[in-house]
Image (cartoon, rainbow, N blue to C red):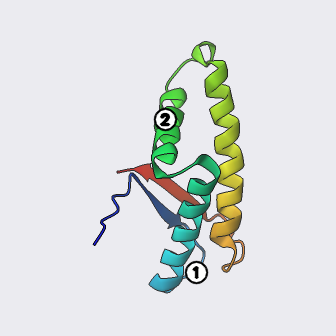
């Protein structure tokens, strides 16, 4: 049996109505898989998230061209992942997916 260790976790937050756990997990899984597909895998998602968090704490003048490329890729991946995550739920007003390193 192969054990897959996750490097990041996705949680659906502030959905306006109570979702059955099965639907919530399915939406979070769709979101995570879309991020992985867009960025190249779970390790790349974790690396991108780590870099994004570092950039939030850095002054704008230290942002490199590589960081700007990553920002664009993250933005594109986030849009695709959001669409995938909400696909069977409809848009939940104010709802969002939180992505954290574990």
* Residue 62 place in picture, x, y as percent: 58, 14
* Residue 44 place in picture, x, y as percent: 51, 44
Mark 2 Cα shell of 10 Å, populated few (<14), some (14-19), many (≥20): few
Q: Is residue 64 above or below residue 17?
A: above
- Does residue 19 appear in this view? no
Of the image marks 1 and 2, the number of the one nearer the N terminus: 1
**Looking at this view, is 79 or 91 the one in front?**
79
* Residue 23 place in picture, x, y as percent: 53, 82
Q: Tell me what residue is drawn at x 71 percent, y 72 percent.
A: 91
Between marks 1 and 2, how big is the CA–CA gap? 30 Å
Q: Is residue 39 above or below residue 98?
A: above
Q: Tell me what residue is drawn at x 30 percent, y 65 percent.
A: 3
- Does residue 31 appear in this view? yes
18 relative to 80 in the view: left or right: left
**Residue at the spot of label 1:** 17
**Residue at the spot of label 2:** 53
Q: Is residue 49 above or below residue 15?
A: above
Is label 1 or label 2 in front? 2
């Amino acid at each position: 049996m192969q054990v897959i260790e996750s490097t990041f976790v996705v949680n659906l937050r502030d959905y306006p109505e109570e979702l059955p756990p099965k639907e919530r997990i399915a939406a979070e899984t769709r979101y995570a898989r879309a991020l992985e597909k867009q960025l190249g895998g779970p390790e790349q998602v974790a690396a991108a998230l780590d870099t994004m968090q570092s950039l939030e704490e850095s002054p704008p003048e230290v942002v490199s061209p590589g960081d700007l490329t990553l920002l664009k890729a993250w933005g594109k991946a986030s849009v695709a992942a959001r669409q995938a995550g909400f696909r069977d739920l409809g848009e939940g007003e104010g709802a969002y997916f939180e992505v954290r390193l574990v």
